Amino acid sequence: MHLLYLNDSGSTVNPDEEYFVLGGISVPETSVRWLSYELEKVASFYAPQASDTLEFHAAEIFSGRQSPWNKMRHKSERSAVIQKVLHTLDVAKPDVVAFACAVHKASYPREDIVHHAYEEIASRFNRYLQHINEKTKSYQRGIIILDKSSYEVGLQNPAAQIRRNGNRWGNYMSAIVEVPMFVDFRASRGIQLADQIAYSVFRRYNANDPSYFKLIEKRFDTYNGVICGLAHKIASYRTCDCPACATRPYRQAAS
């Protein structure tokens, strides 16, 4: 079983933000305890007396407006926290894999952006599991876990429809178990790491700041030279040189 923790970054309605991002990390069930342990070590570093209540919410860390991050006056200090969390992936096994979808909102004015991003990631996660099963001759399945405070009502029905009827491309989510689960952000280090990944992708596309993204770029699912785990949904994708667009099959064929 593989658990895909997902979280969001950016707003679907804020006109000052060009992008909405859904992103996270796929973890085999055998590595879940390890991941929690590594993030607890980071929490203990910053809050030795209250590590179990320290939450890694990337946007709050970056802004420094809330406790305990408001005690760090310099942006570089707060940035180091985000980097330290992301660096826990440096020693993760190869089967701990990142996924994200960055949607350029203006390119899809009549679509449900959250549904669009979820369908994209669910399809890519399903394909990732199928590739594993083909390679190992096994039957690995996956479940998607999201932050309970985000889109629980709005995603339940679309996710069930995708699971039952297949995605927009006619492919069934055969390797994904049921509809997504929703858990409390405070109780799940996996969801908190997903938040950091989504924020890193959001900063890469919305603010043209790759400083966090470059720390996780090699973690995205890659198959036959194509970065399958990262989707950049924008009308001008044919001329975009980001890693997701540049490795698309048609771009490789054109070169």
Image (spheres, grey):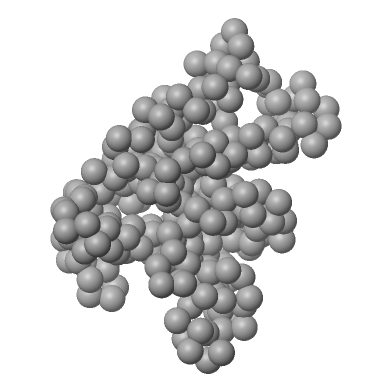
Q: Which residue lies furthest to the bottom in this view?
A: 254
Q: Which of 103 and 227 is in front in this view?
A: 227
Decide: is 72 above or below 220.
Answer: above
Q: Quadrant of the N terminus?
A: top left
Q: In which quarter of the image is the C terminus?
A: bottom right
How many numbered marks appear?
0
Q: Residue at x 28, y 63 (%)?
A: 131
Q: Residue at x 28, y 76 (%)?
A: 169
Q: Which residue lies furthest to the right in this view?
A: 74
Decide: is 56 above or below 197.
Answer: above
Q: Which residue is drawn at 62% across and 83% down?
A: 239
Res 250 seen here: yes
Residue 135: percent from the left, percent from the top? Answer: 24, 62
Q: Tell me the quarter of the picture where residue 88 sits.
A: top right
Residue 179: percent from the left, percent from the top? Answer: 23, 48
Residue 176: percent from the left, percent from the top? Answer: 22, 53
Res 151 seen here: no
Decide: is 167 above or below 220.
Answer: below
For residue 184, side relative to residue 16 (left or right): left
Residue 159: percent from the left, percent from the top? Answer: 27, 55
Q: Tell me the quarter of the picture where residue 57 sits.
A: top right
For residue 6, side relative to residue 251 (left or right): left
Q: Which residue is drawn at 46% across and 47% down?
A: 24
